[in-house]
Amino acid sequence: MNSNIVQVQKSELIFNESQVRLLKSTILDDQTTNDELALFSLVCGRTGLDPFARQVYGIRRKGKLTFQTSIDGYRLIADRTRKYAGSDDAIFDEGLNLYQHLESGRKLPTVATVTVWKLVENVRCPFTASASWSQYSQTYSGKLTETWAKMPHLMLSKCAESLALRKAFPAELSGIYTSEEFPAESESFADRTSAPVNPKPSTVSRSVEVLSPVATSNPAASAEVAEKLHKLKWSDFQIQNCLVANFNAVSPTDLDDDQLLDLIDYLDLFEKTSAEVRRLKWTTEQGKEVLKSQFGVESRNNLTLQQLTKFHNFLKTQKPA
């Protein structure tokens, strides 16, 4: 098998050379073998999850690469079957809802139970599962991780919901797990659902540094791209997201002259959307929610130029709160 391109006929998913480099540097790891890459492409094709939007990623545990997603990814897979019929709010311990459990004075739940509903021959059927605090709560250096300490009920209910969804949709969800189900004690990586692994502290990315005015036959365009990227203070990861979404490339130096001009248009439009967001006085979370609902991503860097144009036009129609 060619080490640079992986093609799986069943899913018709192809990773080109630039995408393979990006996958190994951010979503998987540099130890990823051809077989693991082929299996990952099969999982992406079967689940319909986009690794470049960080909907699915790989974590190596005890030498074995495991594939993970978020609870939102699980819900998305279930929803695409057209048989997912929603889920009930979690109940805790002896059957208390969240309000009742908090009112009881107990800070931590012992057990969370979630029921997921699925249409089976047009009949809405329940699939219920429970997760215990002793088995799923995540610690690091003997202490609860920040998220589990801050939101214990939510995190345990996510584990229970993951178990219930896997019971309801075993064919679609086999071989992939949610990040909440794995202990943090053995992990030495950053949260791959939201940030690059080991991001560089410098505000100037390596991709900007290697883009010199003589990189192409259009030095003016090359210099303008470098200047705009420096002004935006994007990380390598943010630049790669943009380039993969628009050009199937991982560095500005991979672009030809026409693509450089397209990238300039993109960066100009990105600044315009930033101005609109400031006008609306939106928080980061508000922006993420709109992007997730309209495009299925949490960052503008993952949008194509066409999608970014649509997002910009949407922002212009909104009024400040």
Image (tube, rainbow, N blue to C red):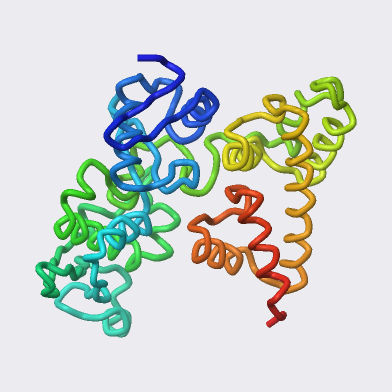
**Residue 276 locus on image (x, y percent):** 75, 67
**Residue 51 locus on image (x, y percent):** 44, 41
The quarter of the picture where residue 223 lies is: top right
Q: Which residue corresponds to the image point at 61% horizontal and 30% vertical from the top-left?
A: 250
Residue located farthest toward the right when viewing the structure as drawn? 220
Q: Is residue 144 above or below residue 35?
A: below
The quarter of the picture where residue 222 lies is: top right
Q: Which residue corresponds to the image point at 18% horizontal and 72% vertical from the top-left?
A: 93
Q: Quadrant of the C terminus?
A: bottom right
Q: Which residue corresponds to the image point at 79% horizontal and 51% vertical from the top-left?
A: 268
Q: Is residue 135 above or below residue 158?
A: above
The reply, left or right, for residue 198 in relation to residue 106 is right
Please state which of residues 70 and 92 is positioned toward the viewer in this rendering: 70
Q: Is residue 307 above or below residue 105?
A: above
Q: Is residue 311 above or below residue 5?
A: below
The reply, left or right, for residue 169 in relation to residue 229 is left
The reply, left or right, for residue 223 in relation to residue 248 is right
The quarter of the picture where residue 111 lies is: bottom left
**Residue 6 locus on image (x, y percent):** 39, 24
